[in-house]
Image (cartoon, rainbow, N blue to C red):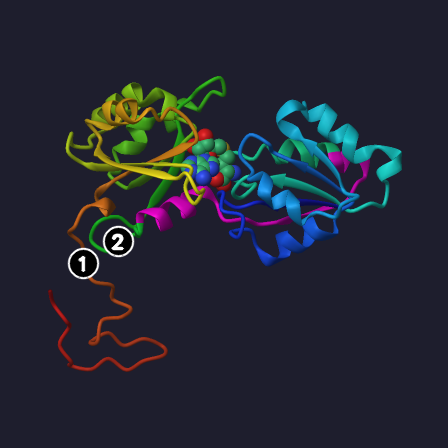
Amino acid sequence: MVHFVGAGPGAEDLITLRGARLIETADAIIYAGSLVNPALLSRARTDCEIFNSAEMTLEQVIAVITAPERASREIVRLHTGDSSIYGAVREQMELLDAAGIDYDVCPGVSSFCGAASSLRAEYTLPGVSQTVILTRMEGRTPVPEREEISSLAAHGATMVIFLSTGMLDELSRRLLLGGYADDTPAAIVYKATWPDERILRTTVGEMAAAARDAGISKTALVTVGNFLGGVHDRSKLYDPAFTTEFRQGTATEQITE
Ligand code: SAH
């Protein structure tokens, strides 16, 4: 059985209990060495075979999994964050389907959630934004034209931009083109939840210069929007006057600042 496991964003204790158990019992682990914290591998059995997919092609990964000597073995394919986000997991599933090999998926904490925790932020603030757009700039992997950054920016929603820290001049230009103001807050989170995490609080207009000054050009997320600002409404759910399925609203006044 093959288990696709989300390793979490970086900190070695941010993997799920299920993911940790799968690592502990695996006969073989293929991990994404470019971003998965190698400390997670210390949970593996001493006789577990370990492969670093950063140095492998899709075909080589599948060849390891389908090798006859690993038939009926427990194999963990360890992806950074959650495997459903830029995980290149579907192409592996299709080849496993074709080979008749069964698999399941164990979710992980995506780096966009890790970044929110590092920022102590809420992406979906009432009165500010109720939508989070996860996207990227096109690199060697193209992005469909209808998903071009400036058209997504036109929503003014919270944006979390992956895989784009090396293109911040162009990213900033497209965000401005889409309608964000120059002084809209932005935060760049480098290696969220890792011991060497860094946070740059900046603006849409200044983000490229801020990253250059800090020497950050990869392994970071760019978060953009007024969720990083100070103004928002209170939630309805916890409003004293609001009645829900579980609680009768009262006339009690809200606490105000
Ligand atoms: N599946 C992963 C994303 C893989 S794409 C997830 O769910 O997080 C790789 C990109 O994710 C990196 O270029 C970077 O933009 C982002 N990333 C991954 N881990 C990160 C971390 N700990 N801090 C900041 N960005 C991270």
Quadrant the C terminus occupies:
bottom left
Q: Residue furthest right?
A: 68
Q: Earlier in the sequence, mark 1 or mark 2?
A: 2
Q: Nearer the viewer, residue 147 or 8?
A: 8
Measuring 13% from the left and 76% from the top, which residue is drawn there? Answer: 253
Name the residue type under label 2. Leu
Give the residue number, with chain letter if any, for mark 2. Answer: 125
Decide whether residue 100 is among the magenta residues.
yes
**Residue 123, can we see it?**
no
Measuring 53% from the left and 34% from the top, which residue is drawn there? Answer: 35
In magenta, the rendered stretch is: 96-119
Residue 60 drawn at (x, y percent)? 73, 25
Give the residue number, with chain letter if any, for mark 1. Answer: 233
Tell me the quarter of the picture where residue 6 sits.
top right
Tell me the quarter of the picture where residue 175 sits.
top left
Residue 157 drawn at (x, y percent)? 27, 41
24, above or below 31, in the image:
below
Q: Are marks 1 and 2 in contact (CB under 8 Å)?
A: yes
197, above or below 24, in the image:
above
Q: How many marks?
A: 2
Decide whether residue 28 is among the magenta residues.
no
CA neighbours of label 2 inside 10 A, class few (<14), some (14 to 19), many (20+): some
